[in-house]
Image: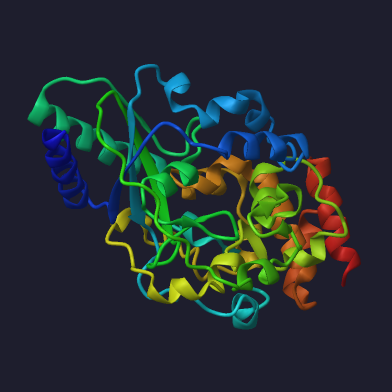
Amino acid sequence: MHEWITLKEKIRGWGQELGFAAVGFAGIDLGTAEQGLLDWLAAGCHGTMDYMARHGAKRARPAELVPGTRCVISCRMDYLPPGMVGCRPASADFLDSADSAVISRYALGRDYHKLLRNRLQRLAERIAAEIGPFSYRAFTDSAPVMEVELAQHAGLGWRGKHTLLLSRSGSWFFLGELFVALPLPPDGPVRAHCGSCRACLDACPTGAFLGPYRLDARHCISYLTIEHAGSIAEALRPLIGNRIYGCDDCQLVCPWNRFAQSTREADFLPRHGLDRATLVELFAWSETDFNDRLAGSPIRRIGHERWLRNIAIALGNAAPNPEAKAALLARADHPSALVREHVAWALSRF
């Protein structure tokens, strides 16, 4: 046992050398998480994310996903760009300018998947250099893995009432895992520190929280602007405001994010002026512009059609002005019925 504890501390140190803010170790028994997942799916809270239901309970069973797994190494990497405030009133982005395009902070830079997978691979190689070849598999939000649950079991934080992992240094971080066939003893969970606070629940613009730890994705702006491919319900459109990709409101009001650390990774810094772009400017991008400028960005996966849909809604929520109206009129005859529908709605708001 002693040798495995010693190896754990070495792995923790190697992970921090590779840029991870924290490294923890979880067992493969996730307790009641499986039933909670099945109840959430049965209630239809996953919306059109059919892949969630397709994998079912496998998400809660690491040893079924990767046979031979005996431990999960959970790693955390900060992504908050320097100069961005970790905690501020949820309405602040609107107060900056209703004509600005608000994009979730995690998506302002390059896609995190490749960077985290590369670091996890390097961590696995460092372990192998120490102990010899061993069986492992790396994941970064790319397979049926209950990342928050594993990170919680690994002691990297606790599940906040907004369902995200939360720590004493906030929630602005990515998670990645190494499923390993090594008998590394788990770290164990830490105590939750949300208390009676419900700032994240009350801040949600669309009321997507059914209660603490219960999110109905069908009303979540991140789901609507990223995962949902079709028309967005008219009743929800005004509530989206000028958010065109994701939503950070529940994190922006969290008191723990006052202690958030800025990222040290250049890849996570804002690109192409996305942190200060206007709606009219981005709405004018052609499909070629969209694909070229967002190459290597997580935003690119939603495609140009949904990009225009989202921005059309935001323009409809902006203060009426000639530039916005002209931009919408220029897309009124767009080949996509989805885009035309949302442009027509936006024009009707002027």
Asked whether the viewer can see residue 326, the reply is: no
Q: Is residue 177 left or right of residue 129?
A: right
Name the residue furthest front. 1
Q: Residue 110 in the image: state x and y as whole percent.
A: 40, 50
In this rendering, the count of numbered labels is 0
Name the residue furthest bottom. 95
Q: Residue 291 in the image: state x and y as whole percent.
A: 53, 43
User: For the point 69% across and 66% down, which residue is it?
Assistant: 204
Q: Nearer the viewer, residue 341 or 266?
A: 266
User: For the point 25% across and 28% down, which residue is it?
Assistant: 183
Q: Nearer the viewer, residue 278 or 25?
A: 25
Q: Quadrant of residue 8?
A: top left
Q: Residue 9 in the image: state x and y as whole percent.
A: 16, 46
Q: Quadrant of the C terminus?
A: bottom right
Q: Quadrant of the N terminus?
A: top left
Q: Nearer the viewer, residue 60 or 252?
A: 60
Colour theme: rainbow
Q: Is residue 297 above or below residue 86?
A: above
Q: Is residue 313 left or right of residue 122?
A: right
Asked whether the viewer can see residue 50, the reply is: yes
Q: Nearer the viewer, residue 252 or 135?
A: 135
Q: Residue 331 in the image: state x and y as whole percent.
A: 77, 54
Q: Is residue 24 above or below residue 120?
A: below
Name the residue furthest right. 348
Name the residue furthest top. 67
